[in-house]
Image (cartoon, helix red, strand yellow):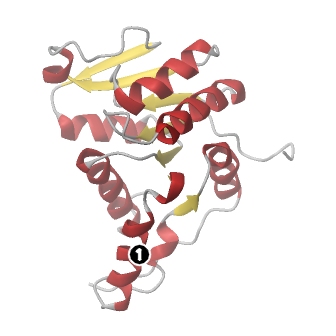
Amino acid sequence: MPLNAPKLTSLCVFCGSQKGADPAYAAAATTLGRALAGHGTTLVFGGGRVGLMGAAADAALASGGKVVGVIPDFLKDKELAHPGATEMLVVPNMHVRKKTMFERSDAFCILPGGVGTMDELFEIITWRQLHLHNKPIIIVNVTGYWSQLLTLLDRMIAEGFAHPGHDALVTVVDRAESVIGAAEAELAAPKPPVLFKV
């Protein structure tokens, strides 16, 4: 990495509170957690001890990394907060959770997950589309998990519901090992804001 290249100091990871049917999903979360710790990058996540969230946090902590959880109080009350997080921020609701995760992160990574993960993904894409930020958004398409969603994004453009260029709002990689490099490459050479009409 060139001496003046920006370093990824914190990465927000959006992912499932379940582990999913394919062991490759948890393996990717574990790989990413280890890689972040090895790189000295803080993992910012939804604070859960379960699913892919827990797998990523466990791996980062086991490798000596820093982990910041952001969890709404109603989920903490259900004892779902990760007990080993370096820092656990308890917030009043889901909206504050997403805003706090955004503020604490240089970039975003999306691993497999369900509707909650999709909610987080689409909100952060929408904020970028509206020029509220220009932070990298890296989708990890583990074993093609997000392929149909990516096809839908293309369809939105083709059908006139999104403007050409909106596909540049995200960067897609196939492996968790590629996330840090993809994020730092974009931090070094930010994508131009997507032009849109309202």
Q: x and y percent of residue 103 in the render?
A: 40, 38
Residue at the spot x=35%, y=75% of the render? 152
The foreground one among 151 and 122 is 151
Left or right of 125: which side holds 139?
right
Residue at the spot x=62%, y=47% of the render? 179
Question: In the displayed structure, would residue 79 be above or below residue 9?
Answer: above
Residue at the spot x=55%, y=61% of the render? 172
Three-letter residue code for mark 1: Thr
Question: In the displayed structure, would residue 161 be above or below residue 92?
Answer: below
Work out which quarter of the rendered image holds the N terminus and state it: top right
Which of the 4 image quadrants contains residue 41? top right
Q: Residue furthest right?
A: 2
Q: Residue furthest top?
A: 83
The foreground one among 100 and 85 is 85
Q: x and y percent of residue 116 in the render?
A: 25, 45
Q: Residues within 10 Å of mark 1 (few under 14, many from 20)?
A: few
Which residue matches tag 1? 151
- Residue 32 visible in the shown view: yes
Q: x and y percent of residue 150 in the render?
A: 43, 70
Question: In the displayed structure, would residue 117 be above or below residue 146?
Answer: above
The foreground one among 58 and 105 is 58
- Residue 135 visible in the shown view: no
Q: How many marks?
A: 1
Q: x and y percent of residue 188 in the render?
A: 71, 55
Label 1 secondary element = helix
Residue at the spot x=48%, y=47% of the render? 108
Work out which quarter of the rendered image holds the C terminus and state it: bottom left
Question: In the displayed structure, would residue 190 be above or below residue 59?
Answer: below
